[in-house]
Amino acid sequence: MSLPSGLTGQAGVATPALAGSAAKANTRMLAIDALRGFVMLCMLLDHVRETFFLHRQVTDPIDALSVAPDLYFTRLLSEICAPVFIFLTGLSAWLYSQKHSLNETSVFLLKRGLFLVFLELTFVCFAWNAEFPPKTLWLQVIWCIGICMIVLAGLLHFKRGWLILLGLAIVGGHNLLDDVVLGPESPFFVPWSILHQRVFIDLTEFTRARTTYPVLPWIGVILLGWAIGPWFGKDTPGAVRISRLFKVGVGLLLAFVWIRYLNVYGEKPWVQTGDALRTFMSFMSAKKYPPSLMFLMPTLGLGLILLAYFEKAQARWSTARLAIYGGAPMFFYLLHLYVLKALYLLAVALWDTNQGAYYGFDNLSGIWLWSLILGVALYFPTRWFANLKQRRRDIAMLKYF
């Protein structure tokens, strides 16, 4: 669920504490990698849940009226992941453009985008399904990031002001299209499903695709990430950047509370249940597929606040450790998926299923414990790979991870 670290400019240089003076000289990149690392650990928790809690899978894990609160809030924690990943992709693309021409940046984004689409349809899909050939191609976040990068490759030649307006219009206005639903008989069914409709698309008699991440709203997010790039220019003082990030982040959270309270746009209405906890859960529930305005405002707002925090706290040990994960994001992403699949298959082989048709933990405490164990265990190979990328910059392929 993350981007190739080549899009972070000097990301790898600024990640490990052992990078020495280079880390101290580039706190902007350290903060970006630390934020990416933080949300990747949130993603790990969610994927452990999806792997070892299949017996408690529900249609919508943030359905406030039916899902148990412990499962609801565990899932809610991961909601920040995709918005931050894609927003940082746009920001990192802008940083890349500061050392390359726009044409070079376009080519870079096009190549990386196509690579991510390929990766989703092959290695990522196999990690989830363990099937070859797959019966279903799940077009998830890596696919989505790849498509967004391809679109940004074409749009970045427009002026920044136009991209801000387009990004805001997409993020703020795409919910007006929610009632546009097309069936397979329509000639626009496939492109519309890729853009804004979560459905299955029959590809062959044996294979279908699932547009899990309709891409239109995410295109708006990547455009806004690109547009915020000048705040991270070398001429912008760190204190000014931190202040801007914090103010915009808080502003988004306050705007979310106000618009959500009005119950008029951007999400299905929340309800007064008579129970304070369930009412709060209803208020916070928001559609992710595709992401509604009420989903994107608080997640992006919190992401900006955290980005400001990590830049301010760049000297802390925890920030440098988190930045390790963000220094090799695609490596970590693929590694954790295959480790989880291997652990699940091993558990089934050793102990058989213990939760109906699945092997799983009895309660969420096991999910949290194993997320912590895996987060620590995967830190060391991720650190090794992040350092390898810095030592072997002559190997172009490493930049993809």
Image (cartoon, helix red, strand yellow):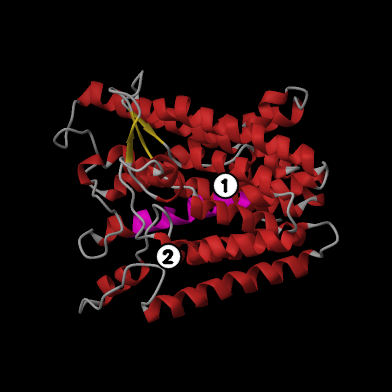
Residue 176: which disc? 2
Q: Which residues are magenta?
A: 73-88
- Around disc 1, counting alpha carbons within 10 Å, would you say few (fewer than 14), some (14 to 19), or many (20 or more)? many
Residue displayed at 61% across by 42% down: 149
Image-quadrant location for residue 180 = bottom left
217 is within the stretch colored magenta: no
Residue 323, visible in the rendered structure: yes
Q: Position of residue 268 (x, y in %)?
A: 32, 68
Residue tagged by mark 1? 37
The amino acid sitting under disc 1 is Gly
Answer left or right for 252 relative to 352.
right
Residue 76 in magenta?
yes
354 versus 242 height, above or below:
above
Amino acid type for the residue under numbered disc 2: Leu
Label 2: few (<14), some (14–19) or many (≥20) C-alpha neighbours in 10 Å: few
Observer-side mark, 2 or 1, equals 2
Tell me the quarter of the picture where residue 386 sits: top right
Q: Position of residue 135 (x, y in %)?
A: 31, 25
Magenta span: predominant SS is helix
Where does the image place residue 179, in percent across and percent down from the top left? 34, 60
